[in-house]
Amino acid sequence: MKIAVPDLISNSYLPAPAAVELGFFEKEGLEMSYELIFPVDDANKALRDGKVDFVGGSAHSTLAGFPEWEGAKLICALSQGMYWFLVARKDLEIALGDTHALKGLNIGAAPWVDLGLRALLKEEGIDPDTEVNIAPIPGTVVPGVSFGVTAAAALEEGKIDAFWANGMGAEVAVTKGVGTIVLDPRRGVGPAASFNFTQPVFATTQKMIDEQPDKVAAAVRAIVSVQKAIKRDVSLATEVGRKSFPEAETALIAQVVERDLPFYDATISPDFVMGMNTFCRDMGLMAGDPSFEEVVATQFAHLW
């Protein structure tokens, strides 16, 4: 069996590759591997086309492969809350939370990930189409590239004014002294509604749920177990990093994960689905209003 992950150098998706590398899937009797498939819409299309069995990615992006939630469900969360940061060039001297200072900037953001920023800016009264320039960073929409880490390099080189990416990208930029964090919705720096725009999740097809429910349950148990293990011993993140991260990012992963420990929780709540549904409709990703049970495979909720 195989998992598609859109960024392997990510603290938020970490439970998926970690459960492979640390043997938690194996303990559940599953032979599991993972593959970097970026951007995240391609990961979900690979799930749709039967090339992979699970996706560890953003919840809303499931719609890229399964419009109106037809044919796929979320089976657990990898972590909680919208998990991207807005990091600006340090020399711009933008204060934490000063969203309006972003006007006029060139901001790098990956496909589908950018939708979270666009919706957040709308909440703050900023037109994301006319008052800022949000676009992919050249060289990132290619196989084998970590968007966040590449975005930090682009910021350092002055190719962009800011980027919207994961915690590792933010940590690299801040540690190097080239960037400062402006927005962090997961920790309340941003409009309250943005926390539930999306979150990192584990998803699979309805076909898999119907035909192999025992294997899906085993996969959920593996994710829950690795989340608990990382909470007990954050150094496990470094162990995983050594197997799949570049050296510089391996040195940083434990501190990034430690900051996120409160968010490693497999729960998917009705409030989250309600917030995500509103976000998805507002961004034109779907027209309907699916119920909690239409989005989440609730038969596995007792395992969370």
Image: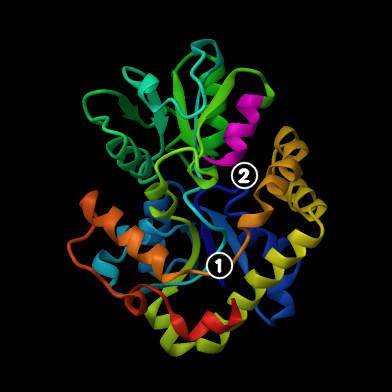
Q: Which mark is residue 259?
A: none
> Residue at the location (30% across, 40% down)?
123
236 over 189 or under it: above or below: below
Residues 156 and 290: in front is: 290
Q: Quadrant of the C terminus?
A: bottom right
Depth check: 27 or 130 in front?
Answer: 130
Pick the front one: 297 or 214: 297
Q: In which quadrant is the N terminus drawn?
A: bottom right
Q: Quadrant of residue 137?
A: top left
User: Residue 273 or 26: which is nearer the viewer?
Assistant: 273
Amino acid type shown at disc 1 = Lys
Asked if residue 214 lies left or right of residue 136, the reply is right
Q: Which of marks 2 and 1 is nearer the N terminus?
A: 1
Q: Residue at x 69, y 82 (%)?
A: 29
Q: Quick check: is 222 in the magenta stretch?
A: no
Sort mark 2 into few (<14), some (14-19) or many (20+) by Cα contacts within 10 Å.
many
Q: Residue 2 carries which label?
A: 1
The nearer-to-camera label among 2 and 1 is 2
Residue 24 position by quadrant: bottom right
Q: Are marks 2 and 1 in contact (CB under 8 Å)?
A: no
Q: What residue type is labelled 2?
A: Ile
Dot 1, how many residues are within 10 Å of its Cα: few (below 14), some (14-19), or many (20+)? some
Q: Residue at x 64, y 77 (%)?
A: 221
Instruction: Name the element at disc 1.
Output: strand
168 inside magenta stretch:
yes
SS label for mark 2: loop
Q: Give the range drawn in magenta.
A: 166-174
Alpha carbon distance from label 2 to label 1: 18 Å
Q: What kind of colouring is applied to the model shown?
A: rainbow
Q: Name the residue under label 2.
A: 9
Left or right of residue 19, residue 235 in this image: right
Image location of residue 272, percent across then percent down: 41, 63
